[in-house]
Amino acid sequence: MNRKLDVVRKRMAELGLDAYIVPSEDPHLSEYPPEEWKLRQYISGFTGSAGTLVVLSDEAGLWTDSRYYLQAADQLRDSGIALFKDGLPDTPSYMNWIIGMLPQGGAVGIDGWCFSARNVESFRATLEGYGIRLVADIPPLWDEGVPRKRTSLYGLPIAVTGLSHQEKRERIFAKTSADALLLCALDEVAWTLNIRAADTPYNPVAVAYAVVGRTGSLLFAEEGCVSDSLRAELAQQGIVFKPYDTISAYLESLPEDFSLSVDLDKTNYALSHRITCRKVVEASPVALLKACKNETELSGFRLAMRKDGVALANAFSELYGRMEAGERLTELDVADILLRHRKEQPDFVCESFSTIAGYAAHGAVVHYSATAESNAVIGKDSLLLVDSGGNYLHGTTDITRTVCFGTPTEEQRRDYTLVLKGHIAVAMARFPEGTQGAQLDVLAKMPLWRAGADFGHGTGHGVGHFLCVHEGPQNIRKVQNGVSLLPGMVLSDEPGVYREGKHGIRIENLVTVREGERSGFGLFLQFETLTLFPYDHSLIEAGMLSDEELVWVNDYHKRVWNHLSPFISDKKTLKWLGKMTSAIGR
């Protein structure tokens, strides 16, 4: 019996609703919402970062993507909630499922604060075509609210950001004709105003809105979280503080002839509905400006990668040593060891996401998260996949390595080397200006395809500068998004292969787009690999690598040694790193 579903259904009946949709997002449409907005997780028990719950009077379903198929199946067991594997050909969208289940005259409820304005209008038009009403002002139908917790905001100096708020404002208004710009996405607010906080898990952002004008800006944040000194500092940059909850009243007060730039994909429906002035509906110009890092930001990334590489070298050296000594280590121990060593690095702020440490079959769960119940003991007869990252004051890291503490099998070596070949192919790519990430996706997958294997997640996602580890609009995946790869963009390069019940393999570095040579065919771009950490020698089948690939691996390992070794004082770690970065021969 699912008491939480019973509570939701009772309230649905009181409100005359036949269906209620619970998304993963908060009013800022965040990937990692604050605790008080994790309603889908509270009701369903599914803890993945992406998913949508639909509750009917007698049925319920949860939609999530391939990263979470195995995790969701486990967490939804006996919950009364059916799993729908989004992205598979036979899986209906949750909207089509609702339409098939409800009669004409039915009513679907949502909390308009947690859906984008564009999605709500699309939902309404679709449902009305089948005689079904959409009610978009339903509050959260759950009775165990979590108190709102906010942290103190702080500013970042130009030495870290590379650009002042005024300079960013000028660049924004070179790309829009509106009088002002409404920002709801937390990373866009943080980047534009050069502020940070710790209001959401793993992302150093403040829960805040901003209205950016041509001569000044407004910051809407929790009153007790903005000190007098920060208010004075912001005022010098033309930023005026306003209490967070006054954003609706402000938008409703704007004169009709005032023009406000609004991104309907990033603005929640409830807030958009309150705008009475003239809307300039367009994609946020901040997204692309933020994605193309300036040289100060890129230098910060490189520094963060060096510190992260040193932390990981100390951590993995410890792991290898303790495993060799026969100690009992678990998946949660691995996460704790990584965090402990990262905390030793100057300017470390927090993890950039919850560490994924999956041993053996758990490695095949793409976004596995170890719990006290699932916590596996690390052995020597399978593979350990570790995906982790850190936020430093000058950059964000995200790295995946797969290792074996014993003697790998032929299948494990073959799978690993196929993934490595795809990883190298992306890293070595040269491509003409105007190329989109989708056009490079095949490079990562071709070695696997030739062997009859594949992976379902994206090959690469954008990464923010001391911001969100998942950033748009840039990516590398099979679906085109219309965005060209541009100099300064930072992305992940992370192919993988997952054998359910056996093992998972993923190899991930961060790369940045750089200008290459210019020829008679135009400007060509290329990637600079930012991440600094070795691959597991024991898993590389050198005979499967081309001469060019083998040279790339050896050159990369030489670079890792040269960048990290001067900053490692522990002799055992230095010895381990020397072994892991030694040249690989045939």
Image: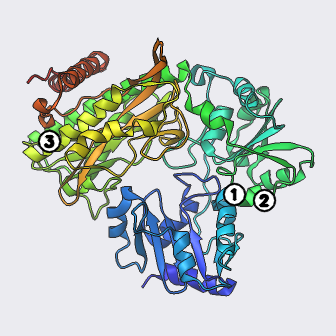
Observer able to see residue 231 = yes
Amino acid type, label 1: Ala
Whole-angstrom CA distance, mark 2 to mark 1, is 8 Å
Q: Residue at x 24, y 29 (%)?
A: 534
- Residue ID for mark 2: 273
Q: Earlier in the sequence, mark 2 or mark 1?
A: 1
Q: Which residue is mark 3?
A: 414
In the drawing, does residue 240 fall left or right of residue 445? right
State the residue at coordinates (42%, 66%). 46
Q: Secondary structure at mark 1?
A: helix
For residue 153, say whether it is visible.
Answer: no
Q: Nearer the viewer, residue 539 or 517?
A: 517
Sequence order check: which comes first, mark 1 or mark 3?
1
| Disc 2 to disc 1: CB gap under 8 Å | yes
Secondary element at tag 2? loop
Relative height, residue 219 to residue 51 (above, below):
above
To which residue does mark 1 refer? 117
Residue 200, above or below 75: above
188 to the left or right of 550: right
The first of marks 3 and 2 along the sequence is 2
| Left or right: 335, with 390 as reference point | left
| Of the pair 488 and 576, the residue shown nearer to us | 488
Amino acid, disc 3: Arg
Query: Looking at the picture, how far across and down is residue 543, in whole percent?
Result: 10, 30
Which mark, residue 494?
none
